[in-house]
Amino acid sequence: RVAYVNGQYVQHGQATVHVEDRGFQFADGVYEVWSVFDGRMADFDGHMTRLHRSLNELRIPIPMTREALERVLKETVRRNRVNEGLVYIQVTRGTARRDHPFPAEGTAPSVIVTARSLPLSKGNAAAAKGVAVITHPDIRWGRCDIKTVGLLPNVLAKQAAKERGAAEAWMVDEMGLVTEGSSTNAWIVDESGKLRTRDTQSNILHGITRAAVMALAADEGIEVEERAFSVDEARRAREAFYTSASGFVMPTVSIDGAMIGDGKPGPIATKLRAQYLDQARRDAI
Ligand code: PLP
């Protein structure tokens, strides 16, 4: 395996950044993940646009043109011979003596890209059975719309899920409303049959898969409401699922050990997964 590190392709085992990198010191960096189908990246523009937005919001300089970045991402996929899998990019504010304010102007941002294989069959097997989620308090900051590498609350939530045999943790705000998963957006089909997911004005990540699935649901004539749901509503839901670039649409069949619906992947979740996969594969570049 090889990784791209600041202009060079290096052996993955030897791929390192400096101890004074601000990503390491302050989590002062952002990232993106694309899924790969047939060696090509899905939802390319959506993730690229969000990467630029994250950088702009944090005033991290754009490290290279979009075209150059696209070339690096594609080359990293190619060199790792990824057919089905994931590509990861991280951009930090660069390396500088540890000091909280931004480093001197002209400090180059650090850019690293990795790619790895992850066969679709693995996710499909989980999706066919449906997965469990737990709930966990959302203890994050006020800018969850920025995809930063500051993920400690998400790490703690996901670990709690793992320790309880669940695939994901749905984070819950002080009102008892689900915000999103630790690395996914959360959805239900409520008791009235409406598809519900929290609105993006309320401190969650604007999921690229979420946006794609919303459009697919609209095409299907399924009513989608961007409105937060409570843990209680999730327990009573007909169906539930979560979305992300790595998990696509993942049917969710229990929450905190309580069965959702009939405890099997729901028809809407199953259909949206198939449609999303078709579209992502078709439009990948
Ligand atoms: N919410 C959080 C907190 C995430 O970290 C992610 C993805 O990593 C998502 C949602 C899903 O976003 P996307 O569909 O763009 O992968």
Image (cartoon, helix red, strand yellow):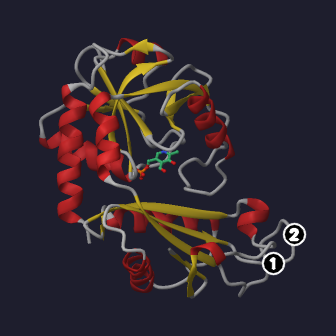
Residue 40 screen position, x and y as percent = 29, 70
Disc 2, SS:
loop
User: Can the viewer see residue 266 in this picture?
Assistant: yes
* Quarter occupied by residue 172: top right
Give the residue drawn at x 17%, y 32%. 222
Q: Residues within 10 Å of mark 2 (few under 14, many from 20)?
A: few
* Quarter occupied by residue 14: bottom right
> Which one is nearer the viewer's eye here, 46 or 248?
248
Q: Which label is found at residue 99?
A: 2
User: Can the viewer see residue 223 in this picture?
Assistant: no
Query: Going by the image, does 149 lie left or right of 231?
Result: right
Give the residue drawn at x 23%, y 51%. 277
- Asked if the beta carbon under badge 1 is closer than 8 A to the nearest atom of ligand 1, the reply is no
Question: In the picture, which quadrant includes the C terminus?
Answer: bottom left
Q: Which label is found at residue 136?
A: none
Give the residue drawn at x 68%, y 75%. 16
> Which one is nearer the viewer's eye here, 47 or 21?
21
How many numbered circles does the render carry? Answer: 2
> In this rendering, is residue 166 above or below 39?
above
Kindly indicate whether the residue at mark 2 contacts the one at mark 1 (C-beta within 8 angstroms).
yes
> In this rendering, is residue 218 above or below 79?
above
Disc 1, SS:
loop
> In this rendering, is residue 189 above or below 75?
above
Residue under numbered circle 1: 96
Residue 105 screen position, x and y as percent = 74, 84
Residue 150 screen position, x and y as percent = 67, 53
Q: Check disc 2 and give the amino acid type.
A: Asp
Residue 273 screen position, x and y as percent = 24, 41
Query: Going by the image, does 161 lie left or right of 84?
Result: right
Disc 1 from disc 2: Cα separation:
8 Å
Q: Check disc 1 and give the amino acid type.
A: Ala
